[in-house]
């Protein structure tokens, strides 16, 4: 076997492994539009460049059938590549979306690395003492009764550290459905929002019309993320989540 065949074989194996990782990330940890909203694209690109490009490239450079230490060298390359893969996989897992809490008039996309483990320990509801592993969970929030804590949370919200990243104040979505329903608006009512593009309004209006034709009225609530603005379609009658767009 020459170096080119060895490199191609290494490339094929690397592509198969990264493809399996991509399916796990895309379908389980970052489903739907969360792949774009939570920087899944960038993280997968980095992992792909390291494991699919660099590994086979190193094999192409060092491979020589007459080299006495060839097996050892290739073993080192594979071990290092697997190490990078595990590190990249852990980085993607640690930054995955875990919760979609509702507060006041909007939802927030919260990733695992935004929540302090100490805050999770304070959660009274056992469901919020650990992260979901298969996609984010939609929840409500409830401010504490103490005025000083309420003020502290509001101040923290000004710098992105508000109630949305405090699991001790999460409540099951059913307890917040009425508030979500009250905050939901029609697509055309989003037009006054600077962060809502004309393209989004047109897309949501089409979605609203199709649902209406099917006998279901929906309204929308903004879902704030660091990358893009998403929208949660809400059943007008029940407040139940229909879809994230």
Image: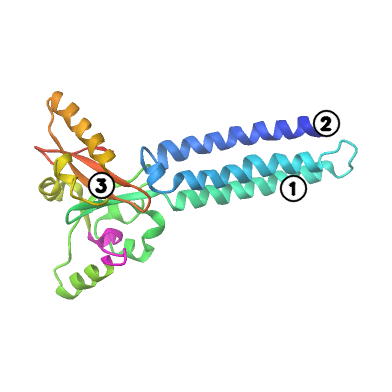
Q: Residue tagged by mark 1?
A: 76
In the picture, measured across the screen, residue 225 lies left or right of residue 186, that is right
Q: Quadrant of the N terminus?
A: top right
Which residue corresponds to the image point at 12% horizontal and 50% vertical from the top-left?
179
Instruction: Describe the element under mark 2 as helix, strand or loop.
Output: loop
Q: Nearer the viewer, mark 3 or mark 2?
A: 3
For residue 196, which numbered disc appears in the image?
A: 3
**In the image, which residues are magenta?**
157-169
Disc with the residue nearer the chain's start (1 vs 3): 1
Disc with the residue nearer the chain's start (1 vs 2): 2
Q: Position of residue 138 (x, y in %)?
A: 26, 47
Hey, which residue is sitting farthest top in the picture?
214
Q: Position of residue 54 (x, y in %)?
A: 68, 44
Which residue corresponds to the image point at 74% horizontal and 44% vertical from the top-left?
58
Q: Quadrant of the C terminus?
A: top left
Q: How many marks?
A: 3
Which residue corresponds to the image point at 12% horizontal and 33% vertical from the top-left?
217
- Is residue 164 located in the magenta-colored stretch of the structure? yes
Query: Is the residue under label 2 in contact with that under label 1 (CB below 8 Å)?
Result: no
For residue 2, which numbered disc appears in the image?
A: 2
């Amino acid at each position: 076997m020459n170096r080119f065949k060895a490199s191609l074989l290494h490339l094929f194996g690397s592509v198969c492994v990264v493809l399996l990782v991509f399916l796990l990330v895309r379908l389980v940890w970052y489903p739907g539009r969360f792949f774009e909203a939570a920087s899944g694209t960038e993280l997968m690109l980095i992992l792909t460049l390291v494991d699919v490009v660099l590994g086979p490239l190193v094999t192409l450079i060092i491979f020589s059938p007459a080299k006495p230490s060839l097996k050892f060298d290739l073993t080192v390359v594979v071990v290092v590549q697997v190490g990078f893969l595990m590190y990249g996989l852990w980085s993607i897992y640690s930054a995955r979306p875990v919760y979609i809490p509702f507060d006041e008039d909007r939802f927030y996309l919260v990733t695992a690395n935004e929540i302090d483990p100490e805050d999770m320990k304070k959660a009274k509801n056992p469901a919020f003492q650990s992260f979901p592993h298969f996609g984010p969970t939609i929840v409500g929030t409830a401010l504490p009764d103490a005025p000083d804590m309420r003020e502290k949370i509001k101040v923290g919200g000004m710098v992105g550290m508000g109630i949305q990243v405090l699991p001790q104040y999460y409540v099951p979505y059913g307890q917040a459905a009425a508030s979500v329903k009250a905050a939901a608006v029609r697509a055309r009512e989003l037009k006054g929002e600077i962060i809502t593009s004309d393209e989004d309004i047109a897309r949501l209006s089409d979605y609203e019309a199709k649902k209406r034709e099917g006998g279901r009225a929906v309204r929308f609530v903004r879902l704030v993320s660091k990358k893009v603005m998403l929208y949660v379609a809400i059943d007008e009658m029940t407040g139940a989540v229909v879809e994230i767009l």
